[in-house]
Image (cartoon, rainbow, N blue to C red):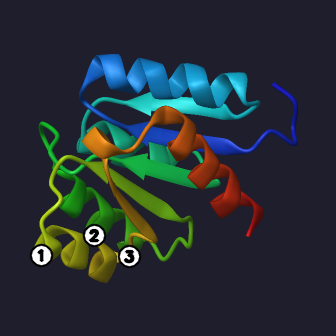
Amino acid sequence: MSPNKQKILVAEDEKTLAKALMLKLTKAGYDVTEAHDGEEALALTAANTYDLILTDLVMPKMDGFHFITEYKKKGVHTPVIVLSNLGQDEDVKKAKELGAVDFFVKASTSLAKILELVESRLKS
């Protein structure tokens, strides 16, 4: 791995989507780590630093809301983007109040669009 590769953590329990995100982001030149639940994601953030985190909200062991809450308690300023099929206004509002910088509904956001959003967030 080259030292200037930006690191992304993908916390997603849907293995098919997680794999597709990993492939898309890796092909774009990012160093991507995968977690399949909130607890695993939190453990990975304790051992590594990331430039960006993509998280689902509905995951086993620890949901995305709890993950964001626990992660932000560390005082880290890594941007967190939520990708979820929960698209209700209250879910979006809660995620952003907890510290998410963006919120996208998986069912209506293509992988190409996610890559575009990741790239623009990492450049800013």
Viewer-proximal residue, 100 or 37? 100
Task: Tell me if I can see residue 121 in this picture.
Answer: yes
Question: Pointer 2: residues within 10 angstroms few (<14), some, or many (20+)?
Answer: some
Quick check: marks 3 and 1 in contact, CB under 8 Å? no
- Which of pointers 2 and 3 lies earlier in the amino acid sequence? 2
Judging by the rendered image, the residue that carries numbered circle 3 is 99
As measured in the structure, the alpha-carbon distance from the residue carrying label 1 to the one carrying label 2 is 16 Å
User: Depth-wise, is mark 1 or mark 2 nearer the camera?
Assistant: 1
Which residue: 70% across, 34% down? 30
Q: Name the residue under label 1.
A: 90
Toward which corner of the image does residue 120 lie, by quadrant?
bottom right
Identify the residue at image location x=53%, y=71%.
76
Q: Nearer the viewer, residue 47 or 16?
A: 16
On screen, residue 86 versus residue 52, left or right, reads: left
Residue 7 locus on image (x, y percent): 66, 42
Distance from label 2 to label 3 (Cα)?
8 Å
Report whether 2 appears left or right of 8.
right
Amino acid at circle 2:
Thr
| Residue at the (18%, 59%) spot, across then down | 87
Of the numbered discs in the image, which one, if any, rests on residue 56?
none
Q: Nearer the viewer, residue 59 or 17?
A: 17
Residue type (three-letter) at the residue carrying disc 3: Gly
Which secondary structure lies at badge 2? helix
- Front-most of residues 29 and 48: 29
- Quadrant into which the N terminus falls: top right
Q: Is mark 3 on a helix, strand or loop?
A: loop
- Disc sitting over residue 69 in the figure: 2
